Amino acid sequence: MSVSSVNLATGVGQQNAISLHAKPSASYADKVAETLALLKQAVQEFSPVTQASSLGAEDVVITHLINHNALNIPVFVLETGALHRETLALLERTQAHATVPVNVYRPATEKVIAFVKTHGQNAMYDSLELRKACCQVRKLEPLAQALKGQRAWVTGLRREQSTNRADVPLIDRTDEATKGQLKLNPLANWTWGDVWHYIAENKVDYNPLHDQFFPSIGCAPCTRAISLGEEFRAGRWWWEDEAAKECGLHAKK
């Protein structure tokens, strides 16, 4: 899917993400109801359940739904040690205003130091293997800690985000047999316009990097703004082939 935006390099336009993207689909109200129903089902049938948040647009929508409806779904954030300052500032604001716990998981300091000492600060650009190794230390190992003891976890995956995610189900049972865990994707059917309409309608706090044409936001070294006509996740690991653009959190099995 292409994202219509203004190329920063041209200096054209002063619009923000809301004015550019807040265009709900015809079935928007039904999608909100479907999402809320799945979140309530998660509390009733799949507890303990937690939300994984990268503090992107999709995730702040889910966190708002959780808080606004007083749902017992704690939130966790993976603070990789390489996030943008804008993301860290939003994390602080989210923790200050949330009605549910917002837990932060960080990589083991000694492992990060060892990785950088062995491979260098910019190893992720050198090969796919080293980039995945960096994600392993900074994301996947903290994720494993965050998911310990959880029956289910909630993500902001949407089918529209990329071809790799085109068949994302509302309830992913891939790991149910091996790990006893479900992955819930309550925004699977939402469009980008739906996401931003919800943010606008409910005055949800969001990452200001979205106003700078970052539709998908990860670690600072591995995320850039996109230009007119580029794919939604083109700014993530932009030096790699499209098929490789997952960190392992949501890799297909």
Image (cartoon, helix red, strand yellow):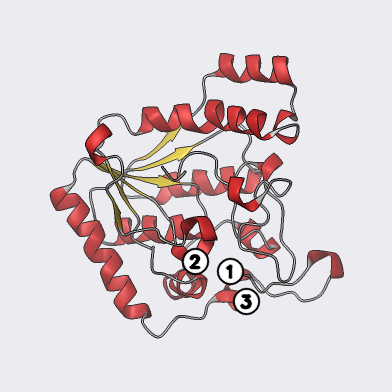
Q: Residue at x 71, y 57 (%)?
A: 225
Amino acid type for the residue under numbered disc 2: Glu
Q: Residue furthest bottom?
A: 26
Q: Position of residue 88 (x, y in %)?
A: 57, 42
Amino acid type for the residue under numbered disc 1: Met
Q: Which residue is mark 1?
A: 1
Tell me how many marks there are. 3
On residue 160, the disc is: 2
As measured in the structure, the alpha-carbon distance from the residue carrying label 3 to the one carrying label 1 is 16 Å
Q: Which residue is mark 3?
A: 20
Is residue 180 at least partly visible in the picture?
Answer: no
Drawn side of residue 182 relative to residue 20, left or right: left
Q: Position of residue 42 (x, y in %)?
A: 21, 52
Q: Earlier in the sequence, mark 3 or mark 2?
A: 3
- In this rendering, is residue 44 above or below 139? below
Q: Nearer the viewer, residue 246 or 116?
A: 246
Q: Residue at x 47, y 72 (%)?
A: 191
Characterize the local packing of mark 2: few (<14), some (14-19) or many (20 or more) Cα atoms within 10 angstroms. some
Q: Secondary structure at mark 1?
A: loop
Q: Nearer the viewer, residue 48 or 18?
A: 48
Q: Quadrant of residue 16?
A: bottom right
As measured in the structure, the alpha-carbon distance from the residue carrying label 3 to the one carrying label 2 is 17 Å
Tag nearer the camera, 3 or 1: 1
- In this rendering, is residue 80 above or below 194? above
Drawn side of residue 176 relative to residue 93, left or right: left
CB within 8 Å, label 2 to label 1: yes
